[in-house]
Each structure stands twice: as structure tokens, then as C-alpha cells.
Image (spheres, rainbow, N blue to C red):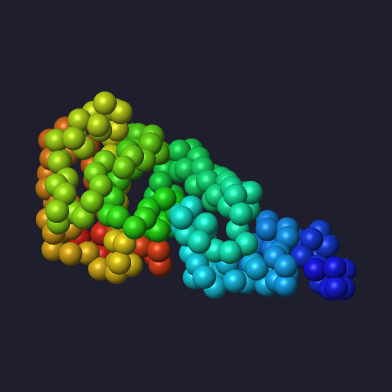
Amino acid sequence: MKDLPAALRPREKMLSMGPQALADVELLALLLRTGLQGLGVLQLAEKVLNDLGGVSGLLHAQGSQLSAIKGLGPAKRSELMAVMELARRALSRELSTQPVFNSPQTVKDYLRIKLGALPHEVFAVLFLDAQQRLITCEEMFRGSLTQTSVYPREVVKRALALNAACVVLAHNHPSGVLEPSRADELLTQTLKSSLALVDVRVLDHLVVGAGGALSFAERGLL
């Protein structure tokens, strides 16, 4: 890094031009700060992004994935995981202060960071108040939805306990394939009918993968 002209060093470049002027690898290099023997920090940052599939992969990376990359010791892993957790919390707070469908992309981004890189299938529910603001997002069931039952009764009980007026359902596809299955569609209708009995609306069901999120509402499947 010292061999670079001052204007090209990430820190100096950011201070003079703003963070938007930096490439992904330069932003990550600022977080990593140091490289390895024979591998500068920019080269290490490039390797991390290549190994994880870019910034999206980094945001969804699990601790085990980070620890498998040479050069990411406990301190660097802790800092990266802290940044990712701050991103999750920032999106969560944004959803808790305004109606979720004022910013549907924020909902997708939040769920992608929360669920997108999990190696196992998880069924989560965003419980919303009467103004469609986030109360909480909870993982209700874990495991392949074709093997692990999702119990509508438990979702209804939790919605009543939280005094939720509506919900957004979500589950991830670890395969990365976002296309909903017939079982996903049937489950959505079952939950929609069960929650309607206690006057709780299902606003959407999102299928999440590392590469994106698919909305049932946008597909006309609700």
C-alpha cells in the first residue's frame, strides 16, 4: 500500500473523494488494514471477494467461511462480522420505523443478509404492527420444508402474543434457486387461511437466496 501514490491509497482516496469513489476491493482493504507476507492488503481483499463471490457473498458469509480463508485471523473475522451485523441492525431499524412496503427492496435486502447464506433451510416470519412496521423477525422452523413441518398453530400463537396485525413470511433456498415449489405455494395458502381466522393478514412470502429474493405478492401468488 505504501508503494502506491498517496492519491491512489484507499484511505486518502476516500477522505478526498468520498467512499463512493472506492472500488469494492479498496473498501474491504480499509477494513482488513494489513495483508500477509508476500500478499498485500489489496491482494488479500481481492482474494476474499473472489473466494466468497463478491460483496454479496461477503455480506452473507458465515464465520466458518471466513475462517477458511488464509489471512483472516480472529481479529479480522471479528471486524467483518461486526460490520455485517451492523448492516443487519440498520436495515431492521429502518423497517421498524416505517411501513415495510414503503421500501420493499429494504425488506428483501434485510432477509438476504439474514437468511441468504444459511446452509440449511429456515422458515422465518416478520411480525408487523397495524402500521406495517416491523415488531420482530423470528426464525420459526428449521430444516428442509419438505421434511420439517411448519406448524400454522405456532405462527398464529406467536402473532397473537406479539399483537401483530400482519406478517411477511420468508424462507431460504440454500441451493440458490428462487423458484417457489408447489409445496411452498400450498404452505402459503395454509398459513394465510389460518392467520385470517385471527384477523392477521399475510402481506407477502419471500423466497430468499444468496443471489436475490422472490416475492409471492409480485408474482400474484397470494
- Where residue 27 appears, x then y in whole percent? 68, 62
Q: Is residue 84 above or below residue 45?
A: above
In the picture, measured across the screen, residue 169 lies left or right of residue 1, that is: left
Residue at the image point whose x is 16% and y is 32% from the top? 198
Residue at the image point whose x is 52% and y is 58% from the top? 66
- Where residue 9 appears, x then y in whole percent? 81, 67
Q: Is residue 177 above or below residue 140?
A: below
Q: Residue furthest front?
A: 37
Front one among 189 and 130: 189
- Where residue 155 appears, x then y in whole percent? 21, 37
- Where residue 96 appears, x then y in whole percent? 45, 38
Indicate the quadrant containing the N terminus: top left, top right, bottom left or bottom right.
Answer: bottom right
Residue at the image point whose x is 33% and y is 39% from the top? 138
In the picture, measured across the screen, residue 77 lies left or right of residue 10, that is: left
Which quadrant would residue 131 be assigned to in this image?
top left
Residue 108 in sight in this render: no
In the picture, measured across the screen, residue 15 lies left or right of residue 217, that is: right
In the picture, measured across the screen, residue 160 lies left or right of residue 93, that is: left
Front one among 66 and 186: 66
Front one among 61 and 124: 61
Residue 82 in sight in this render: yes
Please tell me how many numbered marks the rendered image carries: 0
Residue at the image point whose x is 26% and y is 65% from the top? 219
Indicate the quadrant containing the C terminus: top left, top right, bottom left or bottom right.
Answer: bottom left
Q: Is residue 194 above or below residue 104?
A: above
